[in-house]
Image (tube, grey):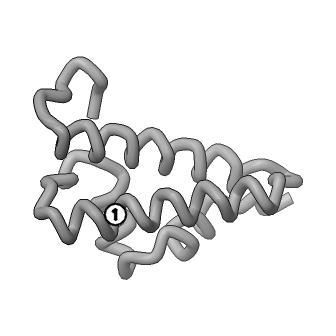
Amino acid sequence: MNKHDVRDAGQGLAYITDCTLATVADLASRARPPKHELMRQINIAQQAIEWMDRFGVDYSKTRAADVRRLGGKVEDWASQYKSKA
């Protein structure tokens, strides 16, 4: 999802969630991720996905859809990015 595609509040929430999940992926892929910040971003993204579900926001074109496909837990989704170093 791109910023210029946002047309309403729901799409805004989807966009911000997608950005947060990109941050989670970046932090998780580091050899020594800042653990507190990683968990903070995971918790923010998890809450946002729960709100999108509650309010019926379409997030099919965002990383949140991948989180759902993997069971709905951002922490589980983030584990695929953990550094193998």
| Residue density around tag 1, few if under 14, some if 14–19, many if 20 or more, within 10 Å | many
The x, y position of residue 38, in whole percent, is 70, 57
The residue positioned 24% from the left and 61% from the top of the image is 52
Q: For numbered disc 1, what is the local secondary structure?
A: helix
The x, y position of residue 63, in whole percent, is 36, 52
The residue positioned 39% from the left and 48% from the top of the image is 17
**Looking at the image, residue 7 lies above or below residue 19:** above
The x, y position of residue 64, in whole percent, is 34, 58
Q: Nearer the viewer, residue 42 or 79?
A: 42
**Label 1 belongs to which residue?**
49
Quadrant in the picture for the N terminus = top left
Q: For this view, does 75 lie left or right of residue 34?
A: left
Quadrant in the picture for the C terminus = bottom right
Residue type marked 1: Ile
**Looking at the image, residue 50 lies above or below residue 19:** below
The residue positioned 50% from the left and 46% from the top of the image is 20
The residue positioned 74% from the left and 54% from the top of the image is 37
The x, y position of residue 27, in whole percent, is 70, 48
**Looking at the image, residue 5 lies above or below residue 48:** above
Q: For this view, does 10 lie left or right of residue 38?
A: left
